[in-house]
Image (tube, rainbow, N blue to C red):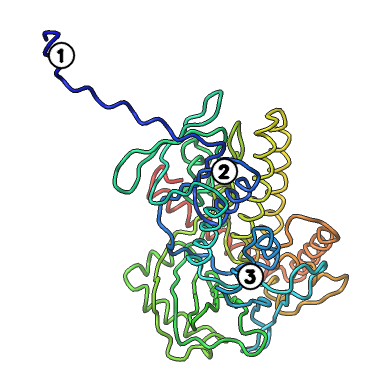
Amino acid sequence: MHAAAAARVPSAPPPTPPLAYDVLVVGGGPGGSATATALARQGRRVALVEKDRHPRFHIGESLLPMSMPLFEELGVREAVERIGVIKRGADFPSATPGEYTVFRFTRTLHPTCAYAVQVRRQDLDELLFATAREAGVATVQDTEIESVRFDADGVEASGHARDGSPVAFRARYLVDATGRDTLLGRQLGLKRRNRRFQSAALFAHFEGVRRREGEHEGNISIYRVDDGWVWVIPLPDGITSIGLVCGPDTLRQRAGERESFLLRLLAGIPGLAERLDAPRIVGHLQATGNYSYQCTRVVGRRWIMVGDSAAFIDPIFSAGVHVALNAAQKAARLVNTVLDDPALERRLQRDYVREQRRGLERVRWFIERFNAPVMKQLFAHPRNDWRLEEAIVSMLAGDLYRDDGIVWRLRLFKLIYYAHCLADLKGALAGVRQRWKRVREVFAADALSPGAR
């Protein structure tokens, strides 16, 4: 081509340079928004990128009392209480048919807050995302980060907006708060399914569900079924969130009749059937594989995971949002310190990993055994010898990260549990068989879907 002709050919536009920040937070749920807010208030330039647009539906509507001080620190406690229903305890079936046992949040070893809140997650998540924006965070929605690349100076993340246009961000540090999408878990090959906690969930919002009376009106109620458990969460405006958590095979076999199957199952649960006054599903009928997992690493050079991006376990004790908020608080402090003194990163990350794993382990043992016959009896007949009931309520309230007499009491409870198992060996073995049945279901599913993880 002649030089004159070449000059007439329009050149391609130069690539848009990445937007530069101190910290890039990926994922606009509670953990991501809280991390971004805290960092921005410490003077950092922060971008918060969410793949969807608020408000968007999300499960996980029951909060814990230990989260209320964290909301206070974020400056949103009163706003959170306004959008929710006050929750003063959790109730479980009693040994007497039709009755129930209430674990009141006033009965903790070290009272911090006597109540929590039940919320529509789309309202909570939108509130926290807006709080980040008000704190000076550059908030971006309808944009999915698809890959990240680390180098000596930081991280570059790229992806696409909903309209297909490419986006790129440059930052000194990356916070992965992508929840079960596990951005870094997938990209770095860190995500591992936990076969001991495999379950699926079927849930919906209902009208026509009677609430508890008096101060227990806002309680979360937990019911056991043969293959799992059911949650009943009172929400504002007369709506009740009800969900079934069970073995994956159960929902696979009912895939074509989810609504009728759920209604029939609820009507057959003693104690819950009496609360159903012509129940009607009014929205959000969904099924999901609640497959538990954990990442083999949750921190690295210039990056850290927060909340469900690091690990996800059975949600029976409603710990998900609280774990994310606690991790956000700690991660923000870590990142802010490391940006000023990178030499501290490895030590601070070791402390972060140790604390987060300790919190999850405190509830993991109880979750694994929740449907065991011995555990049913212990929860139906709570006793406060050595203040053991108060230690259990402390765990249910979200007191997962400090000791102050909780740890040795939970260990003592475990010894009592194992002693009861020896006394009722037949029932204990039945519980073990049920857990291994779940594991076999997962292996069978993996055999049908090679490479699934």
Residue 63 appears in the figure: yes
In-front residue for pair 205/189: 205
> In the rendered image, which residue does mark 2 sit on?
295
Percent position of residue 249, x then y: 43, 63
Compute the Cα span from label 2 to label 1.
Answer: 53 Å
Q: Give the quadrant of residue 383.
A: bottom right
Q: Nearer the viewer, mark 2 or mark 3?
A: 3
Q: Which amino acid, by three-letter code, is at mark 3? A: Glu
Q: Residue furthest top?
A: 2
**Disc sitting over residue 6 in the figure:** 1
Q: Is residue 69 left or right of residue 304?
A: right
Q: Are marks 2 and 1 in contact (CB under 8 Å)?
A: no
In-front residue for pair 370/163: 163
Percent position of residue 274, x then y: 53, 91
Residue 195 appears in the figure: no
Compute the Cα span from label 2 to label 3.
Answer: 35 Å
Closer to the chain start, of discs 1 and 3, is 1
Q: Is residue 268 left or right of residue 386?
A: left
Closer to the chain start, of discs 2 and 1, is 1
Q: Residue at x 68, y 29 (%)?
A: 342
Q: Residue at x 56, y 32 (%)?
A: 172
Question: Which quadrant of the figure contains the N terminus?
Answer: top left
> In the rendered image, which residue does mark 3 sit on?
78
In-front residue for pair 208/272: 208
